Image: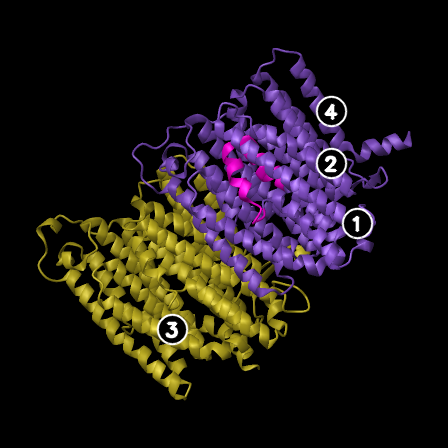
Chain colours: A yellow, B purple
Amino acid sequence: MNLSLLLLVPLITIIAVLLMRSNQQVKWMSLAGASVQIIISLFLFVYYRSEVAAGNTAQMLFQQQYEWFPALHIGFHLGVDGISVAMILLTAFVVIAGILVSWNMEKMTKEFYFLLLLLSLGAYGFFISLDLFMLFFFLEIAVIPKYLLIGIWGSGNKEYSANKLALMLMGGSALILVGLLGLYFSGAERTFDLMKLSQTNISVTVQMICFPLLFVGFGVFSGLFPFHTWVPDGHSSAPTAGSMFLAGISMKLGGYGCLRVATYLLPEGAKEYANIIIILSVIGILYGAFVTMMQKDLKYINAYSSVSHCGFVLLGIGMLTKTAITGAVIQMVSHGLMTALFFAVIGMIYQRTHTRMIDEMGGLLKKLPFIITVLFIVGFCSLGLPGLSGFVAEITIFMGSWEHPDPLHRIITILACMSIVVTAVYILRAVTKVSMGPIKETFSHLKDAAWNEKLAAVILLFGIIAIGVAPFWLNDLIRPGAEIIMQKITGG
Amino acid sequence: MNGTNEFVSLMKPELIITVIIFVLLFIKLSKGIKNDSLLPIVRVLLLLNFIAGFFFNASGSLFDGMYHTDPLMAMQKNILNLGVFLISLLFANWFKKTDHLAEFFILMLSALLGMFFLISSGNFLMFFLSLELATIPVAAMANFDLEKKISSEGAMKFILSSAFSSGILLFGISLIYGATGTISFIELPALVNTTPFQILAFVFLFTAFAFKMSIVPFHLWTADVYEGSPFATASFLAVISKGGVVFIFITVLYKVFQPMQEVWYNMVMLLSIITMITGNLFALRQQNIKRFLAFSSIAQVGFILAGLSSNSPEGITSVVYFILIYVFSNLAAFGVAATISAKTGKENIDDYKGFYKTNPFLTWIMALALFSLAGIPPTAGFFGKLFLLTAGASNANYLFVIIAALNLIVSLYYYLRVIRSMFMDKNEYPLAKINVQLSTKLGMVICAAGIILVGMISWIYDYIQSLS
């Protein structure tokens, strides 16, 4: 399996899109590119499983290594473990759904798809990089497309949101940069290579300085409280596909970075700061949930609930147990799929009703049966109904958290569990208001989902249900990776 | 005969420039040549000059060490050659309008010649002479928009501040001579130490450099001069002039004053921080695109100083590499702004509102240039800035790196202001479609290719590394 395919395919698609003349060609080209991406990532998944089943116990599979800037010891190093494979699958699913959902984009179509594909390139590159310089490169590639997507195609106070997002994410990457330079100069040999760094003994002092820099830096990307403020504005101003990419992929870059770079490379730092992380993330979970209760705009509801749900990811990482870390990764995948679908549905409703305020809607179930049914399923997934992916993720995190017997962890776990009740309140309230009750006159001519919307919803639903009904495949995929991280932490 | 050969081969860049200057003089003397026919000749000559810069680069000294060259210096000179060639392409609109085109290029090449001698100087006397040669023609170039009062004002400010800094420089040189009894770059390192007297002499020298590179607090002339002078001059000042002085600054810091490293490290670092912060903060509120680029270039110098502070071969490499990237990015930004200004007379960032609708090509070039200046991947600026910071971090000075990294955010804010104005802000009457000259387009495409490729292709970095 050649991992550079994951970079080449989006790159070729981007170049092809730029050369296309008509909007129609651009759309079909992007869709073709996204389909190839999803095929490659499914193939990667199958191949990875067969490789592991055949007894290949290497930490990173399908490695490729070339020199890039040999003078500075910067390499071009690719490789995946189960966690990256899961993230790549998520990216491929969200990308194709995002492209399908924005099928009717009329304004500057070519530029729109160009930026979406560039974002996906950044995400793939990030997840398969084993060299921290490359990882940082791809992380930053993904920032500016988001800015332009929100600023050009967004709605509401879009310039403000776009600026806020770009500057806060840039701030996060500035912290990451300093942390990475700290790692670079930490060992006897200067290197950005993740595998080499994981074997060097990084002194405790360096760990104490670099861990907070890296964790907070990546935390900004994943909406760590109190650096979450870009999340609601950015998500609600972005165009539909933009919100899907932001919440579905982009926030996961942060979570993955927290896990793979900060926690894995700096275990001593992680142990030292774990309590602060879990306290901050539980504040994020509860705060996000309570703020969501007060929202009347569907997009804001989902945006704030993303803060709450991404808090679970960081909580799982901060708990530092194998089960909790596995749960955190499952939550990343599950939340990515779920929130992307949620935003897609909101976009579909908005396109028809031209409002996102739940008070102005009602009775839509009669006119839009498909869309509203999907909304129900996503809502249930969000509040953690068994049989859907959200339940699997959250229960795994709680089980992992409960392994700590001390009062602090117990209290935090209980508090986090309680947020589910709040989630149920806001989700049920929103979904009911939108779907039930008398329908307005103006909404009586609405048409249900078109083929592209149905296809996008089905693709994402497939993922959600596949995880919810049969979580073992995802669990098996992630567990070995989580085990290696835990070994590093417990010093085994 | 052997002596002549050596002379020719070592001074090849300078000799070619001199020949071009004379060719232009003769063309000018034979009256009646139009700008339209002169411009292609100049471009071809400059292109040939750039190509010739790749070959037969020897190292050696002439005139008892007054003049010294090596392949790295040849490379540095060729970076400047490239910049001048790009200038001849990018500002076609203005060149066609101006009355004294031949004179402008003669002046510009004379200044370039001064830069070459400056880079190669092996002695403070040579250094001073070539610095003057590199400065005085620029003052005339700044005054080239004769009908504009602001242009004369800019030129006046430039010549006064240059004269002032030359005075300080001479004072510094005489103090150095008083302390050590020599002004030769080869003999000085053995005699330099950290006695207060020598430090004082170094401070005066440094001040003169600071004037030329517009390091805060000696930057006050920069924005006014840029604003007053024509775009071609402003970009020459921002790219070529600054690049040349940075190159010789490397030699002076790393070779001549190496024994004083502990002293200058702190100075360079402190000035780097102040320069970055001041440049960034002032750039935030500029409306005029020239002033905007002036302050952004001040902030960039702050980053260059960050790389210089490392005192390692990586420091040299990353600074030279950054200047190469800076040539492409800054010239592209100046080129777009100049094209807009030449056709519409608009120079304010607010005038660019809705520009993307009418001029997508120019907007993308500007966006690429600004992203590169801001250090956003995949543009080369990302690599340039990152390597500068990596070099600067090698002394494990975390606070310094954090301040520099935070400055990146501030700079992103104002670069995004222009992007936002062009892409996002609504405007019922955006600037009309601009017909871009073919040569300008070519120049911009070269810049864009440079911005994208120089970063990704790592052998360019390795090549510079192998020379330094």
Discs 1, 4 touching: Cβ within 8 Å: no
Q: Amino acid at mark 2?
A: Leu
- What secondary structure characterizes most of the magenta part? helix
- Of tags 2 and 4, the one toward the viewer is 2
**Residue denoted by label 2:** B129
Relative image position of residue A43 (x, y in whole percent): 47, 59
Do we see residue A32 in this rendering?
no
- Residue drawn at x 41%, y 47% is A115
* Chain label for disc 2: B
Indicate the secondary structure of the residue bearing disc 3: helix
* Chain label for disc 4: B
**Residue denoted by label 1:** B178
Name which quarter of the figure residue A54 lies in. bottom right
- Residue drawn at x 16%, y 65% is A432
Q: Amino acid at mark 3?
A: Ser
**Residue denoted by label 4:** B19
Q: Is A293 placed left or right of B30 in the picture?
A: left
Do we see residue B289 in this rendering?
yes
Q: Amino acid at mark 1?
A: Gly
Magenta stretch bounds:
B215-242
Query: From what the image shows, is residue B1 above or below residue A383?
Result: above
- Of tags 3 and 4, the one toward the viewer is 4
Separation (CA) of disc 1 from disc 4: 39 Å
Question: Residue B228 colored magenta?
Answer: yes
Same subunit, labels 2 and 3: the answer reads: no
Q: Residues within 10 Å of mark 2 (few under 14, many from 20)?
A: some
Query: From what the image shows, is residue A249 above or below residue B443?
Result: below
Relative image position of residue B136 (x, y in whole percent): 65, 32
